[in-house]
Image (cartoon, grey):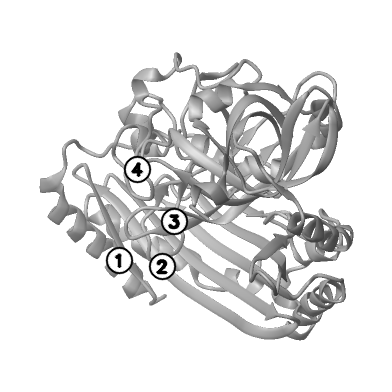
């Protein structure tokens, strides 16, 4: 584990929370929460080895959410003094009183025991904020020059996003938490241009964003040197690859692609506020409605999906969520059947679950907490350790799909299509050369129902994204999705070039 930042813990955290929670109690609130958040975001981007953009931004503020007379109220400020903290509670109460006339039903929160004082950090070794801008630029520049030196690579874009999130939480239930989360996402993309036709192809690295420190970029958790060495070869092969013939194919999908399909067709679809129709922003509600709990055949019998706020290096991993709920692991789909949802305290109480499973998050101090995604993951096989090669060996005619790219999904999270970074033909159980212009298309239940086998633990990779969007005004949330490689039978494959009319 890393360490809490003394400059953050030196703030008058307890005095401010006591003022806010005390005022909320005096005003008759049933519940109150107070958060102080400091988020530092560093972004660096190079174009052909030259610095194009650098950003180093720090936001600091406080937010207070209350429940009074069955209504939520929220207020936020950048002022960190006792009077401002007490004033936040007063403003939140005023908001609750103004909005309660619009409520369809009273707000009640599922019970959660007090966890006392909790101190927690994500697992990191080197705080990226302690690494100089010069050293960061030098590393990205070195990666860029390696690719630019390779034949057929015309341009290279290299970027790094680092986020350091310090959060203090206290509530009227007696839970106090000081937490620090660090996350990094390096991306290197090479571009090759055909000067005669004016067409181009791109290929980027597959290193997923991770809740790790600077050590992630120097060999801990990902072998960047090996990936960079092979990238020009993949790009050259893609340029000369055969365009896919649209048809139905068996697919072996790598974790670097499958994580995004999990995110869009399972992660969002099993947020219970979407399934209940309470949330329709950012691509709608969900086909996995509450009446289907325990009966919806989501996929095949090998499908086991979990939500997890505890997994090491997970982007959504916390000790305590933004409602004071302990981080947990829970089942969503077991044996292909829908068995659970992602919950916050309000919807857990309303729908009779008894307790939230810890899925509340606010992206900054000036945002009210929303029900957000846990690290939603497909579990590997529990017996044996089938490799990618084993899965490919069971395919007569198919495609091996690697890396994520574009995607599309409907407003019910049901009809979708996904593309990827690179695609390899499979013939008689053997991997062939690259093909291109591939997109796979299906309905959610047909796709997951066609999953015949999942790889073993050795194929499991924790992918994810920094920028899962939800709400109005929109909030971003980081989230990971782990999965093994998996085999899907008879999936419809489109030719994206033909579909676009080119």
**Eyeballing the image, is 255 above or below 224?**
above
Q: How many marks?
A: 4
Secondary structure category for the residue under label 1: helix
Q: Residues within 10 Å of mark 4 (few under 14, many from 20)?
A: many
| Residue at x 66% of width, y 42% of height | 244
Q: For the residues marked 4 and 3, what is the alpha-carbon distance in whole angstroms?
A: 20 Å
Q: Residues within 10 Å of mark 1 (few under 14, many from 20)?
A: many
**Eyeballing the image, is 245 above or below 199?**
above
Secondary structure category for the residue under label 2: strand
Asked if disc 1 and disc 2 are in contact, CB closer than 8 Å, the reply is: yes
Work out whether mark 3 precedes mark 1 in sequence or the reverse, and give the earlier one.
1
Asked if disc 3 and disc 1 are in contact, CB closer than 8 Å, the reply is: no
Q: Nearer the viewer, residue 247 or 475?
A: 247
Q: Which residue is mark 1?
A: 88
Work out whether mark 1 precedes mark 2 in sequence or the reverse, and give the earlier one.
2
**Quadrant housing residue 134:** bottom right
Residue ranking furthest to the front: 196
Secondary structure category for the residue under label 3: loop
Q: For the residues marked 3 and 2, what is the alpha-carbon distance in whole angstroms?
A: 12 Å
Asked if disc 4 and disc 3 are in contact, CB closer than 8 Å, the reply is: no
Work out whether mark 4 precedes mark 3 in sequence or the reverse, and give the earlier one.
4
Front disc: 2 or 4: 4
Q: Which residue is mark 3?
A: 362
Q: Nearer the viewer, residue 131 or 29?
A: 131
Name the disc covering residue 299, or none: none
Q: Which residue is mark 2?
A: 62
């Amino acid at each position: 584990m890393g360490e809490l930042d003394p400059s953050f813990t030196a703030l008058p955290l307890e005095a401010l929370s006591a003022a806010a929670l005390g005022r909320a109690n005096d005003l008759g609130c049933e519940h109150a929460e107070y958060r102080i958040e400091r988020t530092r975001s560093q972004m660096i981007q190079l174009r052909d080895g030259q610095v194009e953009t650098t950003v180093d931004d720090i936001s600091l503020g406080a937010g207070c959410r209350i429940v009074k007379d069955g209504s939520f109220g929220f207020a936020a400020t950048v002022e960190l003094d006792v009077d401002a903290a007490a004033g936040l509670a007063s403003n939140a109460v005023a908001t609750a009183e103004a909005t309660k006339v619009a409520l369809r039903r009273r707000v009640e929160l599922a019970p959660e025991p007090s966890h006392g004082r909790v101190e927690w950090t994500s697992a990191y070794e080197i705080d990226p904020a302690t690494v100089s801008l010069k050293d960061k630029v030098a590393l990205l520049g070195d990666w860029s020059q390696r690719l630019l030196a390779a034949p057929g690579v015309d341009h290279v874009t290299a970027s790094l996003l680092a986020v350091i999130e310090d959060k203090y939480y206290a509530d009227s239930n007696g839970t106090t938490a000081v937490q620090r989360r660090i996350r990094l996402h390096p991306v290197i993309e090479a571009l090759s241009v055909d000067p005669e036709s004016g067409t181009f192809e791109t290929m980027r690295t597959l290193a997923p964003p991770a809740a790790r420190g600077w050590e992630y970029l120097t060999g801990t958790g990902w072998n960047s040197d090996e990936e960079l060495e092979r990238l020009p070869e993949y790009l050259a092969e893609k340029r000369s690859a055969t365009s896919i013939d649209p048809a139905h194919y068996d697919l072996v999908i790598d974790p670097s692609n499958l994580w995004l399909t999990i995110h869009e067709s399972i992660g969002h679809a099993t947020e219970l506020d979407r399934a209940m129709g309470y949330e329709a922003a950012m691509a709608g509600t969900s086909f996995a409605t509450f009446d289907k709990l325990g009966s919806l055949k989501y996929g095949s019998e090998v499908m086991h999906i979990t939500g997890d706020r505890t997994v090491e290096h997970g982007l959504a991993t916390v000790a305590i969520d933004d409602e004071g709920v302990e981080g947990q692991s829970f089942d969503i789909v077991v044996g292909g059947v829908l068995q659970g949802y992602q919950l916050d305290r309000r919807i857990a109480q309303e729908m009779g679950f008894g307790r939230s499973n810890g899925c509340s998050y606010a992206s900054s101090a000036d945002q009210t907490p929303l029900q957000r995604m846990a690290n939603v993951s497909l579990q590997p096989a529990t017996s044996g350790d089938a490799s990618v090669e084993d899965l490919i060996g069971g395919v007569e005619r198919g495609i091996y799909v690697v890396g994520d790219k574009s995607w599309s999904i409907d407003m019910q999270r049901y009809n979708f299509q996904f593309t990827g970074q690179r695609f390899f033909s499979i013939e008689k159980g053997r991997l062939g050369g690259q093909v291109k212009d591939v997109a796979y298309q299906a309905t959610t239940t047909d796709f997951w129902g066609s999953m015949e086998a999942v790889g073993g633990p050795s194929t499991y990779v924790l992918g994810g994204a920094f920028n899962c969007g939800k709400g109005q005004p929109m909030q971003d949330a980081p989230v990971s999705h782990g999965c093994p490689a998996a085999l899907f039978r008879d999936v419809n494959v489109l030719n994206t070039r033909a579909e676009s009319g080119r």
